[in-house]
Image (spheres, coloured by chain):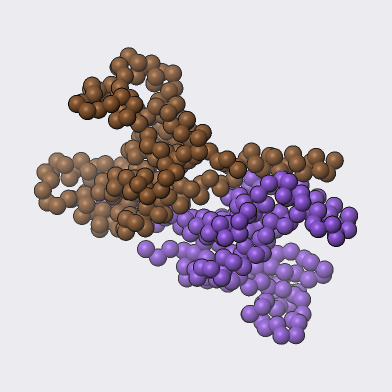
Chain colours: A brown, B purple
Amino acid sequence: MKRRGVLAVISGFSGAGKGTLVKKIMETYDSYALSISMTTRNPRAGEEDGVHYFFISREQFEQNIADGKMLEHAEYVGNYYGTPREYVERQLQAGRDVILEIEYMGAFQVKKMMPDALLLFVTPPSADELYRRLKGRGTETDDVIAGRMKRAIEEADIVNKYDYLLVNDDLDTCVRETHEIIQNTKYSVERNAEFIEEIKRELEVVNS
Amino acid sequence: MKRRGVLAVISGFSGAGKGTLVKKIMETYDSYALSISMTTRNPRAGEEDGVHYFFISREQFEQNIADGKMLEHAEYVGNYYGTPREYVERQLQAGRDVILEIEYMGAFQVKKMMPDALLLFVTPPSADELYRRLKGRGTETDDVIAGRMKRAIEEADIVNKYDYLLVNDDLDTCVRETHEIIQNTKYSVERNAEFIEEIKRELEVVNS
């Protein structure tokens, strides 16, 4: 049975280790395709179009948003950044899984555009540990800590809109569990509606 | 983090290999507790109460149903058979997972009593293969085949009320996938509401 790939969106508290987790999953398993972001900022030395980013004009980016071609997007210091839908869709149709590491507002934009996206939220193993990580190593300014804290409170309020809560205690365990959750999603009944319809048709033919 | 065990209900088409699947999961992994059924039929030679079945009177069984003490039950050739709720609940609270292999009417009774139950449906790998298995080895009477066919058509209509569709092509693969699906359910956001509330409380304390 040829199965459509899974689009997994990973968000999480500051210090939960999202970046390391996603990197390790991509290195460990071969079913994943990298998502390439689209941006309006200028390429830096050594950056290639279609490899590091898709570089496009501000006008084209805004047209893409209007045409529903962006799975999610945000503006950051005067430039747009986002995930082009078509590229991701091609990977999924080829059976490859795609992971997007984005914050919750982007995650909910993606879910709206692609209702079968899987939303994963990564957390440190305890509230104490979360607090330690938010405070950092004592080198951050009070402003940075206050910003992280405000953000964490917002995030804690919307975790219940995610599908799974991943506890990143031991990295290797979390990598394996996250991979299994993404793979097992392929067996959900909603994703197998076509197979079920085929069985129904066959049974009706045989029974008539 | 102490996690509640998962109650997994496994149903499936005739010939899908449910029995073998459940037996192999219980043998392979040690997180599972056997569920012991309750019945009103008389014990046979060698059968022990609380080991093979819980043997009780018809009056007591009917009282149990009325009191909401049965997760599911059915009548078969004049006797009641069912799953006592308290025994299953004790296993789950101790962190052990419980698998019930029952047909769909029982599965939906369980889901009503325990909304966090996970419903798994096992199918052969294709409609062709299902048809071959329904027809059997040519030794069954036409009545038996007609009965299986009628049942399969009913079942195909309610598969979409299950959570996952397990394709039993290679048994070992199906055993591993089923185990992973059951285990990963523990990371669903709904099952971690308490942990999320704890993090929220902690963040509020720290922030005040």
Nearer to us in this view, A26 or A67: A26
Query: In which quadrant is the N terminus of chain B drawn?
Result: bottom left
Which residue in the rendered view is the most extreme toward the top? Answer: A59
Residue ID at (46%, 50%) = A181
Residue ID at (61%, 56%) = B170
Instruction: Point out residue B59 in the picture as x, y percentages from the top left corner.
Output: 74, 74
Nearer to us in this view, A57 or A134: A57
Looking at the image, can residue B69 be seen? Answer: no
Instruction: Point out residue B90 in the picture as x, y percentages from the top left corner.
Output: 52, 71
Instruction: Point out residue B65 in the picture as x, y percentages from the top left corner.
Output: 69, 66
Q: Quadrant of residue A147?
A: top left
Which residue in the rendered view is the most extreme toward the bottom? Answer: B46
Tally of marks: 0
Residue ID at (64%, 45%) = B160
Residue ID at (71%, 54%) = B13
Looking at the image, can residue A14 be seen? Answer: yes
Residue B10 left/right relative to B75: left
A133 is higher (above) or lower (below) than A92: below
Nearer to us in this view, A79 or A194: A194
Residue B199 left/right relative to B150: left
Instruction: Point out residue B201 in the picture as x, y percentages from the top left corner.
Output: 30, 54
